[in-house]
Amino acid sequence: MSSIAHDSAAGSAKPLIFVLTLGEEQAQLTFQESHASFLNELFERATVWHAKTTEKAFTLFTQCSDPHAIFVADGGIARARCEVISRRLVQYAASGGIVVFGGGFAASSHENLEKIMKQTWDLPWNFGSYQRTTLSLNSQAISSTLESKLPASYSLTALYVYGMQPCEAWYLPTECSIVEDHVPGPGPVADFNESPIIFARYGSGHVGYIGDVKPENGTILAMLAMLGLLTE
């Protein structure tokens, strides 16, 4: 992706999505490589404006203060120099916007994750297990229309979160779920209230979290759905 990608030909027809990658260059490259399939779908369905620096992020908000959604793709948003942008994201979501933390965000340090979710966003979420297991779609968290577009269950490796409301977790383990890959080894699921796919109300808008940093196909669909792009 270029620093700011404009799809002028389809700009009026497609929703506008901001993608923020404000971390180190290696983190940005890793995101583009690991999320190539997601990015292909994103560019197909939306007009994408991309910022790799704080200055570019300011430019995006200057050009458009109310995009369709914003995707935060790494932990660079926790840097001190990104504080103003981080606060702007909170205001945007509270006023009706959609902010989704995905990409390589969950691979950030625990300190940075806590800083963003606890200090900046004041969310009651806590970071829990990192494991691979098969999760099932939580029909209480999504509409019947969206339910038909997402996989009923799939296996993924992710950083899980607990402390959210049950209606905010799109996917949850069931009694049939087992930990398929974990240190020191596979075994039964310990907490059925953890989820790596969360989408919650925030003021008049929404905030989403994706803990799968090497996204499975089901995760790609979930990200597109959170961004309001899973319409076909």
Image (cartoon, rainbow, N blue to C red):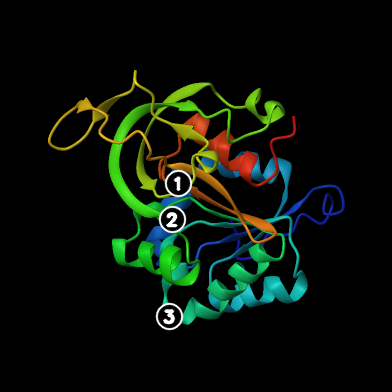
Which dot, 2 or 3, sits closer to the camera?
3
Amino acid of disc 2: Leu
SS class, disc 2: helix
Label 2 belongs to which residue?
29
> Which quarter of the figure has residue 59?
bottom right
Query: x and y percent of residue 227 in the render?
Result: 65, 47
Q: Is residue 167 left or right of residue 31?
A: right
Which dot, 3 or 1, sits closer to the camera?
3
Label 1 belongs to which residue?
33
| Front-lying residue, 3 or 72 | 72
Amino acid of disc 3: Ala
Q: Residue furthest right?
A: 12
Query: x and y percent of residue 140 in the render?
Result: 58, 31
Alpha carbon of mark 3 to alpha carbon of mark 1: how far? 26 Å
**Residue 79 visible, this orientation:** yes
SS class, disc 1: helix
Mark 2 burial class by Cα count in 10 Å: few <14, some 14-19, many 20+: few
| Front-lying residue, 195 or 85 | 195
Q: Is residue 90 left or right of residue 127?
A: right
